Image (cartoon, rainbow, N blue to C red):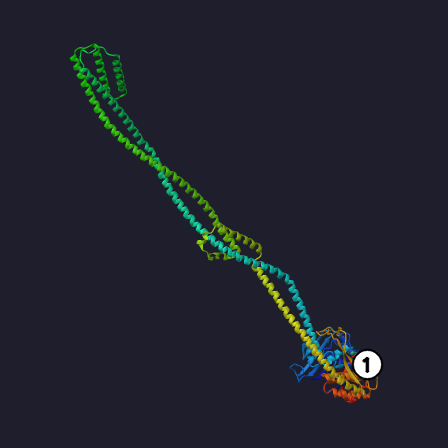
Amino acid sequence: MRVKSLEISGFKSFAKKSVFDFGAAITSIVGPNGSGKSNVAEALRFVLGEQSLKSMRGKRTEDLIFNGSKSAERQNRAKVTIIFDNRDRTFPVDFDEVAIAREIHRDASSEYFLNGSSVRLKDVIELLSAVHIGASGHHIISQGEADRILNSSPKDRRAMIEDALGLKVYHWRIAESEKKLVKTEENMRQSESLRREIAPHIKFLKKQVEKVEQARSLRDELTGLYDEYLKREEAYLKHTREAQKIERETLEGELHTTNEELERAEALRGARHTESTEANELLRVRGELGNIRRERDELARKIGRLEGMIEMEERRLNAPVESQDKMISARESESMAQELFTELGYAESSEDYLYIKGVVSRTRTRIGQFLEHLRGDAGVSARSEEARHAIDGLKGEREALVVAQRDLEVKSMQLEAQARELEKALEAKRAETSDAERASFELRSKKQELTLRLSMLRDHAENFAREEVAFREELREGGILVGRTILDYVNFPLDVEQALTESRAEQEARRKKIERTKIRLEDIMGGGSGEEIMREYEEAVARDEFLAKELQDLEASAESLRALMRELEETLNGQFKEGISKINKQFSEFFALMFGGGTASLQVSYEKKRKRSDTDIAEGPDETEGEESEEGIEVSIALPHKKIRGLQMLSGGERALTSIALLFAVSQVNPPPFLVLDETDAALDEANSRKYGDMIENLAKYSQLVVITHNRETMSRAGIIYGVTMGSDAISKLLSIKFDEAAQLAK
Ligand code: ATP
């Protein structure tokens, strides 16, 4: 890779386009003071991305644009293009030529171009850093800046050396890693803060979720309780329904039968009224029998009397006549009167005509006899005749009574038989009636009992209906709480037979337990749906896990960034130390060469931490350097034959020589692609100018050199010499010249 040319247009004093071709290892630019030579070095700095206006001797961007002169218009833009030969592909782009251009305008806008395409400063810096051309410009030594390295602080010196050694890339990488680390740590803080923010929410949700889970397990428990309860209840209800139906039907059947039986029994009891017919008949028969018996007794008595009268008549018939006494005793009269009184009394109460007629007939006879007796005896024969006649009459009468008596006897026997029949019938009827009464009583009480039981059954049925309603209600309420799974109770394994023997109290206990569980469940569930809380919790946890994972990843990447930074630091330090020792070797040699002896070396020193920022234009990503280093560089020298130790004790020339020795040592160790030396040789005497000339020639083997000089010796080493002149128009002009012309021009 080689710098082919430089085109300057509108930049500082180069108002018109000027092109430098760097076709030789050493190109020299010569010209009078103020002609614009240093502007060429600055144009190089400018196009390579220099951000420090100060290092280009400007205060504002427009100071870099041709400001016009008495005879020339000022320019509105400055453009510098540097063209590299890239046939060796040192630049990692597939072009034989790489043209980097930078253009600025008066409004301070700045543009970069790579082979004509607009690019960012960053791209330019990256491209150049690949070929060890840093924007710090260690390879462009401005006028009077040669000993800058000696004047700088140890820390800045170290930065310059690092840059020259091509180690800046490590700083960039470290800075980049640091930036990434800062960003990563910021992200970590954000993630941590987000996690902290959501933590209470997660905690809250977790509690809710615990509640939901508790509710779920309670619901499961409730479902289990319901399964058994409902299955048992259903079995109970079914059984009870059937049992009540059967009982009702049985009771109703029984009641019906009882009613029928009772009706029959009542009918039997009603038959008592017909009993009186028999009783009346019996009474009648008994009354008739009594009459017949009295009649018979009367007949017996009449027969007895008739027989007494027959006996008396017969005695009278058979008694002697002379003894007959006409006198009738009082006793006889009373006896006859008593007989008649009694006889007529019977006749009076009898309705029997024959009997009454008989009594009248006998009464007349008795009275006739009595009168006869009183009139005296009209003849015994008449009387005897009369007596026989009376006896016959009496006997006839007795016979008639005996016949009547026999009739009565027959009739009485008949009536007695009839009465016995009637009594028997009556007795039988009475017995029957009391059975019916007992049965009626029993049936009535049975009916009463059945009616009572039926009404109790109705009460039970009412209660049962309530239980059935309660069952459906329970099913509905349960459904709301545990969902459709409640219907799975039908699958609950239950020994129905056994279950029905259980007391209702146990089922009631189950119901109470369900009630308690329901209350607890409702209490826990409060409002909000469990699903929603679960989802929200899962989302929050997922988010937290994501953040935790992110944090972990960030931590890992922070750690790998730290490791990378450590590694870069180590490499940097290693290469730095290695570079320093290489530089020291060269530095000593160049120093001894320039001073004809003596020693010089760089030493690593330790400084306190501090920050630095050396950029003036805020543009692009690398404008600030926040790098911290505890190590600086000290320069130790020992001049031959002199006891000078400190740099400040050196003469101007000595300082220039030391600077050049160090500059060349550094350039030798890590040769830059090109090196611009703006009057670095200004302070050298003739002898040293030669040595300087030798050194640049040697250096030119490794790096392309552009030397701005007034020194003939230096000019003599150049392959191409450009003369820069400035006329009255105050515009720098370029001319390629021969050495002699150059020597002339440089004066
Ligand atoms: P010396 O040999 O004394 O070091 P030199 O050749 O290096 O001089 P420079 O310092 O490069 O000269 O050029 C300085 C000249 O450039 C000055 O004359 C200055 O007026 C001119 N110059 C600087 N900036 C501008 C600008 N923006 N517009 C026009 N001219 C400018």
Q: Is residue 121 visible?
A: no
Q: Is residue 106 above or below residue 478?
A: below
Residue 211 visible within the image:
yes
Quadrant of the image for the C terminus? Answer: bottom right
Residue type of the residue flagged with mark 1: Leu
The vertical placement of 489 against 404, above or below, is below
The image quarter containing residue 690 is bottom right
Secondary element under disc 1, as helix, strand or loop, is helix
- Give percent across and percent down for residue 50: 73, 77
Task: Report whether 327 appears left or right of 17.
Answer: left
Looking at the image, residue 216 sits to the left or right of residue 689; the answer is left
Q: Which residue is mark 1?
A: 647
Depicted 243 relative to depicted 279: above or below: below
Taking the spot 62% from the left edge, 65% from the top edge, the residue there is 544
**Quadrant of the image where one finds ligand 1:** bottom right
Q: For this rendering, which residue is in front, 436 or 137?
A: 436
- The image quadrant of residue 85 is bottom right
Residue 252 position, x and y percent, is 40, 44
Q: Position of residue 254 (x, y in %)?
A: 38, 44
